[in-house]
Image (spheres, rainbow, N blue to C red):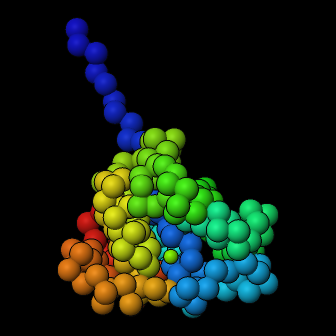
Amino acid sequence: MQIKEIKIPSSKTENKAVFLDRDGTVIFEKPGVYLADPTKVRLYKNTLPGLKKLYKAGYKLFIVSNQSGIGRGYFTEDTMLAVMSAMLKKLKGIKIEGISYCPHAPKESCSCRKPLPKMGKQIIKGYKLDVKKCFMVGDKKSDMEFAKNIGVEGILVLTGNGRKQAKKYKAELKNFKHCADLKGVANYILGGKK
Ligand SMILES: [Mg+2]
Ligand SMILES: [Zn+2]
């Protein structure tokens, strides 16, 4: 006699995620200025509405951020963490599943600075994410290279450095979806097939 098997679908929320760059994507960045003051943290107008939509749709949200200001000696790790917690306080009603950051300066040639895949690969493995259902959102070419390197779809936002990067690296970025901001990203992701 054959044993009948009932396949219980795993929760649809458990393996899809959106990776988010911090500066210029989630929080306001004046291009070229390293944010080192937690009292100056502000979200873009559409950050919270966009992230809420994604969160409610079951996407896990992760921050993956290069914080070379630490390695360059512009601010301490504690200051950077204070900025992170100021950001988290402003992200009311959603949960950020995890925050990864690279504290090194480029000249340290570390293995974690975006676009190297380490931060993303660790999260994907740790949370058993399905890369086909994941996205990386950022305002720089390096964020899109990172997306490619971890095998997820990259989406360029035009906040922060985004608009300038889109122009400067037109050819390199042409295959990546461009969205005005995180609300546009949410609409794209949720309106699509994924
Ligand atoms: Mg950025
Ligand atoms: Zn690093």
Apparent side of residue 98 relative to residue 159 in the rendered image (left or right): right
Instruction: Look at 53% across and 81% down and name the residue there.
Output: 24
| Any part of residue 14 in sight | no
Nearer-the-camera pick, 95 or 20: 20
Instruction: Look at 55% across and 56% down and name the residue there.
Output: 108
Instruction: Look at 39% across and 69% down and name the residue there.
Output: 142
Residue 107's spot in the image, x, y percent?
52, 61
Residue 48, quarter of the rendered image: bottom right
Apparent side of residue 141 relative to residue 81 in the rendered image (left or right): left
Q: Is residue 176 above or below residue 194?
A: below
Residue 6's spot in the image, x, y percent?
34, 30
Rendered-image quadrant of the N terminus:
top left
Residue 80, quarter of the rendered image: bottom right
Nearer-the-camera pick, 93 or 6: 93
User: How many numbered marks does the figure carry?
Assistant: 0
Apparent side of residue 117 relative to residue 50 in the rendered image (left or right): left
Instruction: Look at 38% across and 90% down and name the residue there.
Output: 164
Q: Is residue 115 above or below residue 6?
A: below
Q: Is residue 68 above or below residue 150?
A: below
Q: Is residue 42 above or below residue 75?
A: below
Rendered-image quadrant of the C terminus:
bottom left
| Any part of residue 24 in sight | yes
Q: Residue furthest top?
A: 1
Residue 67's spot in the image, x, y percent?
61, 66
Nearer-the-camera pick, 11 or 15: 15
